Image (cartoon, helix red, strand yellow):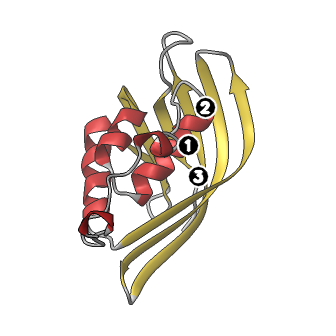
Amino acid sequence: MVLGCTNPFAPKLANVDNQSNILGDQTQVDGVFKNFRYAYIFKDTLVYGNLLADDFRFTFRNYEKSVDESWGRQDDMLTTSRLFLSTQNIDLAWNDVVVEIGDSLTKDISRGFNLSIVFSPTDAVNINGRVNLRIIRNSTSDIWKILQWRDESTF
């Protein structure tokens, strides 16, 4: 009788085959967006870092100063890590692709998104914005990496 019992405090390990669709295939454009969403929702800096090219550049408009500002991969990883650590919950939903042009090695993609960031029960931010990405790869068998990210969101 003891052999037939199940201990609810010691569940079976997950079947790896059933988890194969958690991360996207980054050799596909859709896999980049799926992994981006996964990285934000699960606050996973390893997955996020794998999305960025070595010479990655993030650019945004500083409306107070009326200038564009930007930073590279190292600063973006630090900023994103701090965001992940300072939040209770992050949710990201990608909207329809507005523009996608390019070839099998370089693509420029404009896409809307909805981002919800909960810092505490009384401090939450919702952003509806648009991102312009340039993604690249060296060959069609390589994964796509984000080379440039221009945030077109207005706050």
Q: Which residue is label 3 attached to? A: 152
Q: Amino acid at mark 2?
A: Val
Label whose residue precedes the other's in the sequence (2 or 3): 2
Q: Residues within 10 Å of mark 1 (few under 14, many from 20)?
A: some
Tag 3 and tag 1, C-beta contact below 8 Å = no
Question: Residue drawn at (66%, 47%), measured in percent from left and top?
Answer: 111
Secondary structure at badge 1 equals helix
Note whether 154 is above or below 49 in the view shown. below
Q: Amino acid type of disc 3?
A: Glu
Nearer to the camera, 32 or 57 = 32
Which residue is disc 1 drawn over? 33
Query: Which residue is drawn at the image coordinates 56% and 43% (left, top)?
Result: 33
- For marks 2 and 3, give the one nearer the viewer: 2
Q: Position of residue 82 (x, y in %)?
A: 25, 59
Q: Element at badge 3?
A: loop
Within 10 Å of the Cα at label 3, are there few (<14), some (14-19), or many (20+) other Cα atoms? some
Picture coordinates of residue 45 (x, y %)?
A: 30, 47
